[in-house]
Image (cartoon, grey):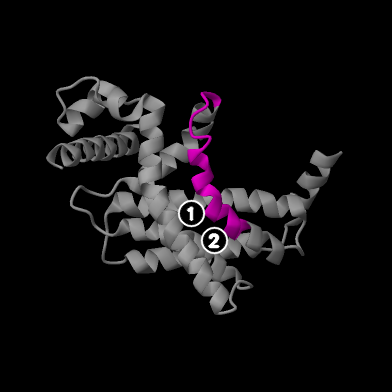
């Protein structure tokens, strides 16, 4: 049992060290040596032992956070269904935001998960090209389940506009919360989170401007 716990602790220490370094410096700028040193490992092959590769480590950090975030989101969606609120735009946006926002609760090791996810969203194509995050990427699915419900509610807008706004929404949620995490201001977290949701709802449901309509037509020509 002691050996199993030691291995599990070793794996987790690498995940937490990598998350912090990736959040601070980006996915491509961090060496495995830096991860080993930050985790307090003398064994220079610990990452390869536990995760197989650098990309395997990125996937493990991603899964470590997103598996819990997705369980939270599914619970919220189930509750909204029971309350017959799946037709409320703000409630659905909240279902996308709040599971991420719970990552702002202070942790002894510090809070880096949202900044890591922001980096991942920015660099994700690099890892997809290397056949990484293809299976782990399915963990974004609960967010897109919310997006599907929102798309149905916004059917009165042009479909391409809605899809574009939903892609932006995904980025804005993580980037907005990552900025709150970076500030470390815990006293007004709820205010900032609910204000972010208001902004997201406003942008998502805004009338399509004449300029955007013209740009859409030019692209279609």
The N terminus sits in image quarter: top left
Location of residue 55 (image quadrant)? top left
Whether residue 19 is situated above or below residue 150 in the rendered picture: above
The residue that appears at 77% across and 45% down in the rendered structure is 215
Does the residue at mark 1 contact the one at mark 2 (Cβ under 8 Å)? yes
Q: Is residue 132 magenta?
A: yes
Q: Which residue is mark 1?
A: 173
Q: State which region is magenta.
A: 129-147
The C terminus lies in quadrant:
top right
Residue 197: which numbered mark, if any?
Answer: none
- Image coordinates of residue 135 in percent, x first then y, are 51, 37
Q: Quadrant of residue 119?
A: top left
**Who is closer to the viewer here, 126 or 209?**
126
Residue located beneath label 2 in the image: 200
Q: CA distance from mark 1 to mark 2?
A: 8 Å
Left or right, residue 35 beside residue 160? left
Near-viewer residue (37 or 171): 37
Furthest residue in direction front, as rendered: 1
């Amino acid at each position: 049992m002691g050996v199993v716990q030691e291995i599990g602790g070793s794996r987790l220490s690498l995940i937490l060290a990598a998350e912090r370094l990736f959040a601070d410096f980006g996915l491509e700028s961090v060496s495995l040596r830096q991860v080993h040193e930050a985790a307090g490992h003398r064994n220079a092959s610990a990452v390869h032992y536990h995760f197989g590769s650098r990309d395997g480590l990125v996937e493990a950090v991603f899964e470590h956070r997103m598996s819990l975030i997705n369980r939270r989101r599914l619970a919220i969606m189930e509750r909204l269904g029971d309350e017959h609120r799946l037709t409320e735009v703000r409630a659905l946006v909240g279902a996308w935001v709040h599971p991420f926002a719970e990552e702002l609760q202070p942790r002894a090791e510090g809070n880096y998960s949202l900044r890591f996810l922001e980096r991942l969203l920015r660099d994700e194509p690099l890892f997809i090209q290397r056949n990484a995050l293809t299976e782990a990427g399915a963990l974004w699915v609960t967010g897109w389940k919310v997006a599907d419900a929102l798309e149905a509610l916004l059917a009165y807008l042009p479909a391409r506009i809605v899809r574009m706004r939903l892609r932006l929404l995904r980025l804005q949620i993580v980037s907005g919360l990552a900025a709150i995490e970076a500030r470390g201001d815990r006293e007004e977290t709820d205010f900032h989170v609910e204000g972010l949701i208001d902004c997201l709802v406003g942008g998502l449901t805004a009338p399509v401007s004449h300029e955007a309509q013209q740009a859409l037509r030019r692209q279609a020509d």
